Amino acid sequence: MTSRLLFDTNILVDYAVANRPEHDPATALMERVAKSEAAGYVTSGSLKDFYYLCRKPLGEPACRQLIRHFLVLLDVLPVGQRECDDSAYSDEPDFEDGLIRVVAERNDIDFIITRDSGAFAHSSVKSMTARQYLELFPR
């Protein structure tokens, strides 16, 4: 069975910025998605946040090209009124993390891939780093 992975913004940034400490695991995991060894998902909010964080350090053309790459590689999951309501009225301390949690739970995601696993401690969807996923599911 192919794992369904929802990528948090910080993993997208790790993948895009070569000098980040978790760049190699993020790249290896994206390569698995590219080879259909895992199914990758993202929210439009994570793509927006990625653009905001990476536009200046990477430059507009490179940042936009990376977003196009993500749009080919990853399926974008919907975030609408229900997801926003559920996050806003939850006891989540962080609205954005709440959105990721709600989207993951609603879309039968197997793992949230993030560097901030603690943010999803109360989720029914297990969260882990890219490195942890690669160690748990070696080739």
Image (cartoon, grey):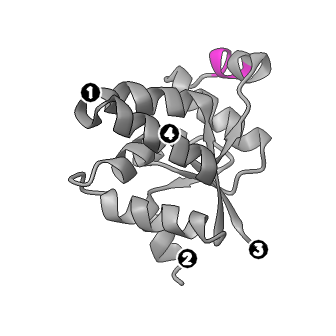
Contact (Cβ within 8 Å) of mark 1 with mark 4: no
Residues shaded magenta:
86-90
To which residue does mark 4 refer? 67
Q: CA distance from mark 1 to mark 4?
A: 14 Å
Q: Is residue 70 above or below residue 30?
A: above
User: Looking at the image, is mark 3 or mark 4 nearer the viewer?
Assistant: 4
> Is the magenta region chiefly helix, strand or loop?
helix
Of label 1 and label 3, which has the lower sequence position? 3
Q: Identify the residue shown where x is 38% and y is 24%.
A: 52
Q: Identify the residue shown where x is 49% and y is 23%.
A: 94
User: Looking at the image, is mark 1 or mark 3 nearer the viewer?
Assistant: 1
Residue type for callout 4: Ile
In the image, which disc is placed on residue 137? 2
To which residue does mark 1 refer? 56
Of label 3 and label 2, which has the lower sequence position? 3
Residue type for callout 3: Met
Q: CA distance from mark 3 to mark 2?
A: 12 Å
Instruction: Tell me the quadrant of the picture where the N terminus can be found.
Output: bottom right
In the image, which disc is placed on residue 1? 3
Q: Is residue 70 left or right of residue 86?
A: left
Instruction: Tell me the quadrant of the picture where the C terminus can be found.
Output: bottom right
User: Looking at the image, is mark 2 or mark 4 nearer the viewer?
Assistant: 4
Residue type for callout 1: Lys
Residue 18 or residue 66, whichever sits in front = 66
